[in-house]
Image (cartoon, coloured by chain):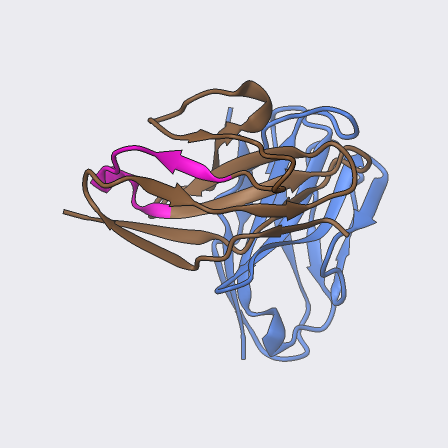
Chain colours: A brown, B blue
Amino acid sequence: AQRVTQPEKLLSVFKGAPVELKCNYSYSGSPELFWYVQYSRQRLQLLLRHISRESIKGFTADLNKGETSFHLKKPFAQEEDSAMYYCALRSSNTGKLIFGQGTTLQVKP
Amino acid sequence: NAGVTQTPKFQVLKTGQSMTLQCAQDMNHEYMSWYRQDPGMGLRLIHYSVGAGITDQGEVPNGYNVSRSTTEDFPLRLLSAAPSQTSVYFCASSYGGQGRVNEQFFGPGTRLTVL
């Protein structure tokens, strides 16, 4: 079964602290993984995708197939990073996108 | 481009009423989908479509119908609303379907309350 698990509902850190948002997945095949972000009063939008191996707004995420994880990391959190973050997995068979439960990141001043 | 648009933004229904949530995109995207967002449950896929005339069920399709008569529009119908359908509904679209890694673009959402 295809599944995405984000174990933390809420992650609260102070400005300047490192951040790691956890994401684990279950998928039989080569996964395509994404992180989406929803800032307050804004639409859900793509943050980054594993295939691009890019850093966006200081965030990176590495696909670890052995641990079936795709954790989102940032070395120094900023207040503007406060948002809801969703990890998502895309099925290469059907194209549908499966989301995790979401983690609210709260960065305190 | 307007991107993905949804109407209405807010709706209150009584149990048993029916209604249609509208979704349209002007980006000529083949793939469209509907999600519901509930606290602690994240985003759950209701129905999706890989092109005009083709639809399929997602994780939570019961109580909802969809159709895709044009590339642009993907309405979601609630046949007989129930309080369990109180949620925020998001429509999304992207290029391509199978075998292509593409960004999904989301609409602003419809907040539905069923009394």
Q: Where is residue B2 in the image (x, y as percent from the top left)?
A: 50, 29
Q: Specify the quadrant of the image occupied by residue A33.
A: top right
Q: In the visual, does A46 lie left or right of B60? A: left
Residue furthest to the left:
A109
Q: Work out whether A74 lies above or below B87.
A: above
Check the picture and name the quadrant holding the C terminus of chain B.
bottom right
Closer-to-camera residue (B28/A6): A6
Q: Where is residue A70 in the image (x, y as percent from the top left)?
A: 54, 38
Image quadrant assignment for residue A60: top left
User: Would you say residue B2 sits in the magenta stretch?
Assistant: no
Q: Residue at (76%, 66%) from the top-left corner?
A: B62
In the displayed structure image, the side of residue A21 where residue B23 appears, left or right: right
Q: How many labels does the image show?
A: 0
Residue drawn where x is 71% and y is 59% of the image: B77
Closest to the observer: A62 or B2? A62
Magenta residues? A71-83
Verify whether residue A78 appears in magenta: yes
User: Which residue is located at x 58 percent, y 47 percent?
Assistant: A24
Q: x%, y% of residue A55? A: 41, 22
Quadrant position of residue A27: top right
Depicted B18 relative to depicted B89: above or below: below
Q: In the depicted view, which residue is nearer to us: B103 or A31?
A: A31
